[in-house]
Image (cartoon, grey):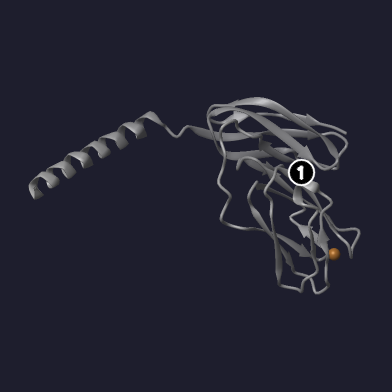
């Protein structure tokens, strides 16, 4: 009996190894940087633009375990525009000695009102839906920021000059979208095969 079991185990292990090898050969990890240049007509520059891959049919991404921080420092939201994958928890840190009162009018973020909290502490909100959440402060009307919750982990904020790069996008056909707080959103299909370029012009 014991010998028989040992023999079976040996055979099984060989099969698993062989199967894994075939799988690894059949699925080459083909991916590339999706990159390009935006022209942001009517805006100061492109530094507030978010470029991202739209929802992929039949594909979901697990909620990230790591939280992302949005700071309130020297009376501004830092970063001003924060793209995250849907499911991400954002920790709103108050780095100022004054009290802020962070809230959003966005229905897709439950119109959250986090209230006020002391310097050095955080309050959190988990973005469970695709959402553009404008962040405001009831105490300081000049404060404004954005959390942009997107359906894929493939996103980037453009540089002021409009250049952007989204690293390691798996090969495939996608809809690439651009959002800017002051300009009309845009989108276009793009087939990623290795390093791929997609350029956009957005305007008011
Ligand atoms: Cu404030």
For the image, the number of numbered tags is 1
Residue at left offset 86%, top offset 41% = 182
Q: Nearer the viewer, residue 127 or 203?
A: 127
Q: Is residue 159 visible?
A: no
Kindly tell me whether mark 1's CB lies below 8 Å from ligand 1. Answer: no
Rendered position, 90 above or below 175: below
Q: Which residue lies most toward the front here?
A: 1
Residue at left offset 16%, top offset 42% = 8
Q: Quadrant of residue 156?
A: top right
Residue 1 lies, in percent from the top left, at 8, 47
Judging by the rendered image, the residue that carries numbered circle 1 is 160
Quadrant of ligand 1: it is: bottom right
Q: Nearer the viewer, residue 161 or 96?
A: 96
Residue 139 lies, in percent from the top left, at 89, 65
- Looking at the rendered structure, the secondary structure element under dot 1 is loop
Residue 44 lies, in percent from the top left, at 85, 43
Few, some or many C-alpha atoms within 10 Å of disc 1 (few <14, some 14-19, many ≥20)? some
Q: Is residue 143 visible?
A: yes
Point out the image quarter for the C terminus.
top right
Residue at left offset 86%, top offset 58% = 143
Q: Quadrant of residue 95?
A: bottom right
Q: Quadrant of residue 184?
A: top right
Residue 63 lies, in percent from the top left, at 58, 49
């Amino acid at each position: 009996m014991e010998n028989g079991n040992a023999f079976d185990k040996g055979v099984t292990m060989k099969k698993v190894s062989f199967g894994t090898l075939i799988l690894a050969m059949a699925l080459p990890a083909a991916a590339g940087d999706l990159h390009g240049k935006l022209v942001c007509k009517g805006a100061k520059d492109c530094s507030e633009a978010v470029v991202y891959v739209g929802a992929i049919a039949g594909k979901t991404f697990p909620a990230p375990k790591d939280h992302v921080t949005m700071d309130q420092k020297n009376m501004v939201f830092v970063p001003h525009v924060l793209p995250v994958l849907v499911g991400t928890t954002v920790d709103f840190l108050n780095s100022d000695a004054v009290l802020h009162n962070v809230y959003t009018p966005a229905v897709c973020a439950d119109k959250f009102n986090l209230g006020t909290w002391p310097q050095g502490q955080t309050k959190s909100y988990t973005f469970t839906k695709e959402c553009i959440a404008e962040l405001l402060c009831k105490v300081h009307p000049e404060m404004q920021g954005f959390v942009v919750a997107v359906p894929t982990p493939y996103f980037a904020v453009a540089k002021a000059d409009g250049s952007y790069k989204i690293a390691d996008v798996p090969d495939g056909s996608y809809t690439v979208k651009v959002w800017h707080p002051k300009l009309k959103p845009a989108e276009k299909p793009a087939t990623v095969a290795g390093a791929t370029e997609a350029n956009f012009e957005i305007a008011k």
